[in-house]
Image (spheres, rainbow, N blue to C red):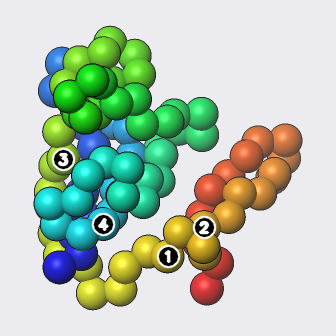
Amino acid sequence: MIVHAELTCMNCGYEMGDVEGPKGASVKELVFLPVHQDDKLVIDRRGRVQCPHCHGRVLPQGVTPVRRPLDPEQLYEAKIDGTVTRGLMY
C-alpha cells in the first residue's frame, strides 16, 4: 500500500513538506516534495529524519492511503521569476 504524509518537526513546528511511498519503507525510498525550495531530508545515524532548522525529531502527520502514487520521473523543477519551483507534469 502506498501512503502519503506531511512531515512536521515536533520540536519547533517547522513544516518540511510531503512524502509518499510504500508503507514501512525506509526514508531513502520515499518521494519527498519540500514546502521550501532548498529543504532536503536530513537523516541521522539511526535513519530518522531531523529538522533542518533545530535538528528536532520530524514525524509524519496525517498518513493517508494513496490511489494514484507520485512518480519521481514526473517531478520537475522550473525557474519562474528567478525562483525554482517543484511540481508535477501531467
Counting residues from the start of the chain, the first of labels 3 and 2 encountered is: 3
Counting residues from the start of the chain, the first of labels 4 and 3 encountered is: 4
Counting residues from the start of the chain, the first of labels 3 and 1 encountered is: 3
Residue at the spot 20% in from the left edge and 28% down from the top edge: 46
Tell me whether circle 4 and circle 3 mark residues in contact (CB < 8 Å).
Answer: no
Residue at the spot 43% in from the left edge and 53% down from the top edge: 32
Residue that label 1 marks: 71
Using residue 82 as the reference point, say whether residue 31 is left or right of it: left
The type of residue carrying mark 1 is Asp
The type of residue carrying mark 2 is Leu
- Say which element carries label 2: strand
Counting residues from the start of the chain, the first of labels 1 and 4 encountered is: 4
CA gap between label 3 and label 2 equals 21 Å
State which quarter of the image contains the C terminus.
Answer: bottom right
Residue that label 4 marks: 21
Residue that label 3 marks: 60
Residue at the spot 27% in from the left edge and 23% down from the top edge: 45
Disc number placed over residue 75 in the picture, else none: 2
Mark 3, other Cα within 10 Å: few <14 / some 14–19 / many ≥20: some
CA gap between label 2 and label 1 equals 7 Å
State which quarter of the image contains the N terminus.
Answer: bottom left
Tell me whether circle 3 and circle 2 mark residues in contact (CB < 8 Å).
Answer: no
CA gap between label 4 and label 3 equals 12 Å
Relative height, residue 56 to residue 90 (above, below): above
Residue at the spot 33% in from the left edge and 63% down from the top edge: 20
- Say which element carries label 4: strand
